[in-house]
Amino acid sequence: MSVVQRFTLGDVLSEHRRGRPLDTAVVDGDVRLTYPELDDRVNRLAHALAADGVTAGERVLWLGQNSFRVLELLVACNRLGAIFCPANWRQSADELAYVLNDLTPKVVVWEESEAVEKARGQVTLDARWVRSGDEYESYLSGDTSEPAHADVLSGTPALALYTAAFDGRPNAALLSSTALISHSMSLLHIRQMENGFTFLACGPLFHVGTMMFTLATFQIGGKLVFTPAYEPKEVCRLIDAEKCTQAFLFGPMIDGLVEANKDGAYDLSSLHFVSHSPEWDKMITVDDSPWCASKMGGYGQTEVGGMLTFLGLGMGGAGYAGRPSPLVHVRILDADGSEVAPGEVGEICARGPSIFSGYWNRPELNEAKAAGGWHHTGDLGRREDDGTITFIGPRLRMIKSANENIYPAEVERALKSHPAIADAAVIGVPDDRFGQSPKAIVVLKEGETATADDVIEHVRGEIASYKKPREVAFVDEIPKRGYTPDYDALDEQHGGGAYPGS
Amino acid sequence: MSVVQRFTLGDVLSEHRRGRPLDTAVVDGDVRLTYPELDDRVNRLAHALAADGVTAGERVLWLGQNSFRVLELLVACNRLGAIFCPANWRQSADELAYVLNDLTPKVVVWEESEAVEKARGQVTLDARWVRSGDEYESYLSGDTSEPAHADVLSGTPALALYTAAFDGRPNAALLSSTALISHSMSLLHIRQMENGFTFLACGPLFHVGTMMFTLATFQIGGKLVFTPAYEPKEVCRLIDAEKCTQAFLFGPMIDGLVEANKDGAYDLSSLHFVSHSPEWDKMITVDDSPWCASKMGGYGQTEVGGMLTFLGLGMGGAGYAGRPSPLVHVRILDADGSEVAPGEVGEICARGPSIFSGYWNRPELNEAKAAGGWHHTGDLGRREDDGTITFIGPRLRMIKSANENIYPAEVERALKSHPAIADAAVIGVPDDRFGQSPKAIVVLKEGETATADDVIEHVRGEIASYKKPREVAFVDEIPKRGYTPDYDALDEQHGGGAYPGS
């Protein structure tokens, strides 16, 4: 691959400044920039960063809420061959200090926060700190020329996103232009994102779920609307004012918009999105693209750029994760790296241009993740007989009881089908006789009752008997990490341990 | 890029054999193959080719009509790192001999033809000749295992397609898996090719126009229907029988289908295609994807994998070629490689993953085509003020008159707007005073009359006066090469010459 085949995030913007000279690229509060204006600012930023020693391979860190500056920083860094990381701003000072020491950025752009200031005091780092706002604006160089960057190729890492810990500490997944642009192409296709697509980034940009639609919208030269964080009234106002085609929204967030707009003050009909409730469906335009029709189903993780499989490519199939994106090849491998037969559970492994380049500064972990030339997701799954894929659960959370493998996700689904159960999680607890046995942590619906025996009997009726919990703990709430149970916390609270994978 | 990021044509089929075990991959006459059956045959073919010395970088040639074997050969060669070329079977024996000597294939698969047999006698070539049909079937090895090919990466050339001559001889453009798969992604997006897409390959597979939709359908795991060549009744029968979503069809071919199906014997409603005539629109389902809504508008060439720009990304814009595919960056450059301003004409140059890897065995030409790290298309174009692109015409056909550049395509459009003119082409003829001057070759509509002066005056009213023809020749028919005038023949017949680009 030579520079003729190159297509970086920097090139995407170079194209749009020429191809969309009149189109709005970003909206953020009072800021409105056309593509040429955005490109000028990105170049001015790149020259400023270069003057601070941001050369190929160096890192730049963003500590703040959502902002159009996140996109500027990403593309400016890419034009220098540097790596940009938007980190979770709401972390504790200790967690932020960890990120600073791990990533050793040359430049940190930050928004006012006690934790950030405290973390800054904890580290000794040779970095330039630039405060977002007036300081950032005066930091930009006056030079709008595009920096020379013929040596930056498509495979150069461009974005770093911290992911959940594998080994007790978070790791920064490095995604190249090739990975990000390939992933964007799969979203453009499955979501039918056409000319004029407008995306409201109201989820966190340090999370791949918001970032992936931000980048796909950028790819097609659409309009990006940034808002610091999810605030229902403001989200409604922005959808109406900017005629947004899509926003980063999940179940409870959607309910929040329905509530905020119950008087119909805002026109949300520009939103082409997922069907959710009768009230919601009346407010928006229900979209029939495979992404929306499948209710955004699939399987993904940061390390694959976002989604690895799409339910929209296997609607009606046996596996609820659907089929791989048109740009990846998935194989289900056992611990020796051999492929398992359809219907059997193994680790979901993949190849393709959207796969990440490894974690920043984790050579040993990277070797393990790429064993045998396959990206090992760390998650268990199964090819069904029709070729669709079922996601089972994290490999390290597998429970081994009397030599049988038990996957918490499967038991959890059986538990949740009980009419009195609102939420459930399953952990493995040490067992003298079987090595480990499953334990259910259960939240009952308001006003409902059930005994431990009721719950165990219900599961026995749904799935193989050896998978049934031997103990049940009733709790008021299950601790969460994002959208999944916080299993580490549950293990600690309920005596979990002795996992075979750990 | 390591093998973890790899995604070759071979990998596409590896995925589909697992992801679409029950789906039909190809239909061709009596042959119907599921994806696993196709994969088995491809592996058997690869083992047979390997035994004949087809190793990485070697070539395999197909001389025949459309067949599912073209797809088998392409993927089998790709799994060996070899290059597959489907050549124009209808060429003369001399032309075929040229291709054989130029490509020096290790294996030639051929269908019965006098010209092929004659060409075979003209060359001394150390190649295995395998006749399509029974001989091909018995040529396949018994080994269905996937050949080891960890060293074949996505950038390895996979397909060679001969293109029109630049320097008096045709050249084989080499397209890698990355180029072909990237291009497929742009078609999947713009054509909204979803799960279950069925494509009827009724145009020639040695032409990128048919090949690009064949490969995009393969990419999404759809069904490919092959027919030897365009035959209206048979095309209607196949659309009906196989419920085809799309076929390779242009204006006169569509008229042929309307005529062939005027009794409504065939149900063509599965076809989601371009609006054409009231009769046609009633037979099919008019499709509203950006590709079909824009009537397949855009600009392309074999060297970019097919399409470089899509009208569907710039509908209503000033430039009728629309905007670049989401995977390419276009710049309009002058002869020194500097970018020209919007509104000015220069050479259409591009970067991106869908750009070819150069021509087979043309090192000097390849260097010129990739000058400055930009693919030089050899075609002139212009960025309009709204960022859309207009294709002007081949660079080598530019006419230079008294130091002014005149582009035949522009003059031709002015000529064709005359009510009496059915067809027109413009060449440059040597001129003692101005170096060159434009000459119009004109076909009048039946029953219409016009003098040379009428024609010249009409053009003067449409475009700048210096661009008007100084001479007009009236002819019955303009010789064509594919869909464009055969300018070489016109130059010869009408005294053309002295082009500044040549």
Image (cartoon, coloured by chain):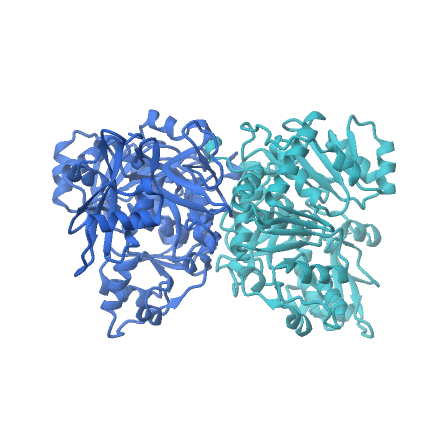
Chain colours: A cyan, B blue
Q: In the image, A423: left or right of B23?
A: right
The quarter holding residue A14 reads top right
- Would you place residue A50 above or below residue A185 in this image? above
**x, y (%) of residue A387?**
49, 57
Q: In the image, B57: left or right of B100?
A: right
The quarter holding residue A83 reads top right
- Would you place residue A375 above or below residue A325 in this image? above
> Can residue A159 be seen from the camera position used here?
no
Q: In the depicted view, which residue is nearer to us: B205 or A348?
A: B205
**x, y (%) of residue A272?**
60, 63
> Can residue B365 be seen from the camera position used here?
yes
The quarter holding residue A169 reads top right
Q: In the image, A249: left or right of B470?
A: right
**x, y (%) of residue A485?**
75, 55
**x, y (%) of residue A431?**
76, 52
Task: Count the labels in the image.
Answer: 0
Q: Quadrant of the C terminus of chain B?
A: top left
Q: In the depicted view, which residue is nearer to us: B399 or A89?
A: B399
Q: In the depicted view, which residue is nearer to us: B366 or B72?
A: B366
- Would you place residue A410 above or below residue B372 in this image? below
- Would you place residue A363 above or below residue A256 in this image? above
Q: Residue at x 16, y 61 (%)?
A: B447
